[in-house]
Image: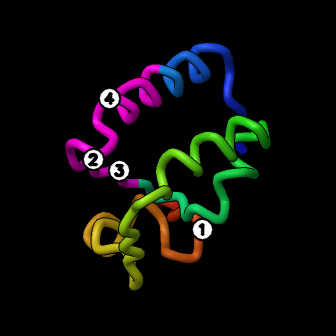
């Protein structure tokens, strides 16, 4: 899993500042292919993960898309929806 390194901490604080500037005045759209319930594990730092999630999901409208990946259907080399990679021959 991804573990945040120092440059990513700096990136988080820059993004956090941008969210802070926009809070209550503008909309912000954030997308992720990683479901929110897996963020703590992926980020690796519980305090930072809590801070990120608190900032993102407070007053948020979440839209979770379901279904098979259209991109993976169109480009089989990307792998299948079950996480297995395609093998070429």
Helix, strand or loop under label 1: loop
Helix, strand or loop under label 2: loop
| Image location of residue 70, percent across then percent down | 29, 74
Disc 3: which residue: 30
Asked if residue 19 is among those painted magenta in the image, a careful observer would answer yes
Asked if residue 77 lies left or right of residue 85, the reply is left
Please say if 26 is above or below 32: above
Along the polypeptide, which appears first: circle 4 or circle 3?
Answer: 4
Along the polypeptide, which appears first: circle 1 or circle 2?
Answer: 2
Q: Residues within 10 Å of mark 2 (few under 14, many from 20)?
A: few
In three-dimensional space, the C-alpha distance between marks 1 and 3, rounded to whole angstroms, equals 27 Å
In three-dimensional space, the C-alpha distance between marks 3 and 2, rounded to whole angstroms, equals 7 Å
Disc 2: which residue: 28
Disc 4: which residue: 21
Asked if residue 9 lies left or right of residue 77, the reply is right
Of labels 4 and 1, the one closer to you:
4
| Image location of residue 80, percent across then percent down | 49, 72
- Circles 3, 2 touching at the beta carbon (< 8 Å): yes
């Amino acid at each position: 899993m991804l573990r945040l390194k120092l440059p990513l901490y700096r990136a988080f604080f820059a993004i956090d500042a941008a969210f802070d500037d926009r809070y209550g005045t503008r909309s912000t759209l954030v997308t992720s292919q990683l479901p929110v319930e897996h963020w703590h594990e992926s980020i690796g730092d519980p305090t930072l993960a809590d801070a990120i999630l608190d900032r993102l999901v407070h007053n948020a409208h979440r839209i979770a898309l379901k279904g098979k990946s259209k991109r993976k259907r169109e480009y089989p080399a990307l792998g299948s929806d079950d996480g297995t990679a395609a093998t070429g021959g």
